[in-house]
Image (cartoon, rainbow, N blue to C red):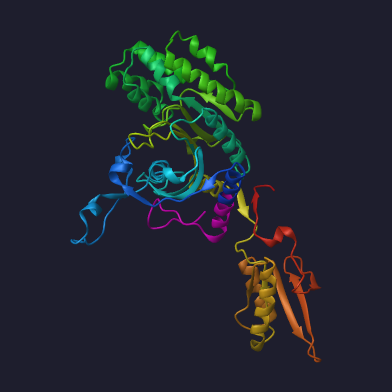
Amino acid sequence: MARKTSLSGFPEWLPEERLVELHVLDVLRETFELHGFSSIETRAVETVEQLLRKGEIDKEVYVVSRLQEDEDAPEKDDARLALHFDLTVPFARYVVENGGHLTFPFRRYQMQKVWRGERPQEGRAREFTQADIDVVGDGALPFRYDVELALVMIDALAKLPIPPFVLRVNNRKLAEGFYRGIGLQDTAGVLRNIDKLEKIGPEKVAQALCDELGASPEQARAALQLASIRTEDTSFVEQVRALGVNTQLLEEGLQELAEVVGEASRRAPGTVVADLSIARGLDYYTGTVYETVLVGHEQLGSVCSGGRYESLASTGKKTYPGVGLSVGVTRLVSRILSQGMAEASRKVPTAVLVSLVDEESWSQAQDVAGQLRARGIACEVSASAAKFGKQIRYAERRGIPFVWFTVRAEDGTLTHEVKDIRSGEQVRADPATWTPPAEDLRPVVRSAGA
């Protein structure tokens, strides 16, 4: 992995590591576009007021200010700005401001840096890249999109050089309906505590429910019983009903979750599970919630999460409900690199180094490089006419697989040859037609053992 930098939590990749990250981004981009999602990009900053509208994340927000204030700035520019901590809140603002120019349901994907003031550790950086997909409706959004987004993300993650994964799904309506049914009215508080279950364990969660929310031991026990339910099919429905709680909101959540899990388990058995401990800490989720873990790497935390939100994007008169999922690209790439799950076939994009026979041949070598590049072959031209052995060693250090030689005969004719410096094979070549093997045309990312 990239060496540690002096600014903890702000990762920087070496060139070969960056190639792995680009591969992950390319796979996600191609998959999202295959499913009909359009790309957008939003600004890096939002007003503090906008960012803090939903969720308890005020301690994690990086506020932005000028080193020297401009006394002549208009009053409207005095609003405090902060770097966005996710891409969903900026996207909601984007939809509200551009609603008249969008076609609904609007399907978007977005790949950008985000900033969050967390304690740095593997999988948690202060500056990191996310890749989001969302579908937003005008006034209403069919629940079927909750199912579709799970299937899109399964398709995308399955193409990455990562271990098997499990997309864990729950429904806020189910949880909130259950809590109200047992007499716990502060459902947001219960969800926040249940969300800490994997970090602090059931005993401490139960204690917090009693101490902070005034739950009785029986109520805390029932909440934990619900959170313990986990199935790979729709059998969770009967397990929940067996707990003896019955509310309309609970029933609605059960039906919605059953639709997601039923369809996904039919298409990708074992990949999606109903996990009723999943809560998601952000307050803007209102229905389906998702979290994804890598099998054998659960301590890394969720690598892909999201959910349904009904009122995050709203003008007051009009609401744009949506559902979305976000991939923690930096978290994934960090684990891929640290565990050697995949590596780039070479350090640089260059496939060919065009050598120089003498200093006067540099312009001629550029002509050769131009012909190669016109056909999509990445190449470099030697900077000096050092001995051929030295030019070849330069290519080896750079990880360039081929070296091109051009020799002018006594009669003035040019002879071109290209050498695969890995095998030592050297053959005649025409710069107008020669192409390297497909696997050498561009660096490829190979999974471990491939």
What percent of the width, then of the height, locates residue 29?
A: 57, 48
Q: Residue 318 lies in what quarter of the image? A: top left
Residue 272: image location, x then y, percent: 58, 29
* Outermost bottom residue: 410
The residue lying toward the viewer, choosing from 449 and 289, is 289
Q: Position of residue 309 (x, y in %)?
A: 42, 32
Nearest the viewer among 95 and 192 is 95
Q: Looking at the image, can residue 303 be seen?
A: no
Query: Residue 379, relative to residue 240: is it above or below?
Result: below
Q: Residue furthest left?
A: 71
Q: What residue do we see at 32% from left, 20% from top? A: 209
Task: Say above or below: 381 vs 321.
Answer: below
Q: Nearer the viewer, residue 360 or 312?
A: 312
Could you tell me which residue is drawn at 55 percent across and 35 percent down?
149
> In the rendered view, does 251 fall on the left or right side of 30?
left
Left or right relative to 80: residue 261: right
Q: What is the number of callouts on the image?
A: 0
435 within the magenta span: no
Q: Compared to 392, does 283 lie above or below?
A: above
Left or right of residue 293: residue 9? left
Q: Is residue 361 visible?
A: yes
Q: Residue at x 53, y 35 (%)?
A: 293
Residue 21 magenta: yes
Q: Residue 316: name its quadrant.
A: top left
Measuring from the top left, give residue 80's x and y in whole percent. 26, 49
Task: Tell me the magenta residue range.
Answer: 1-24
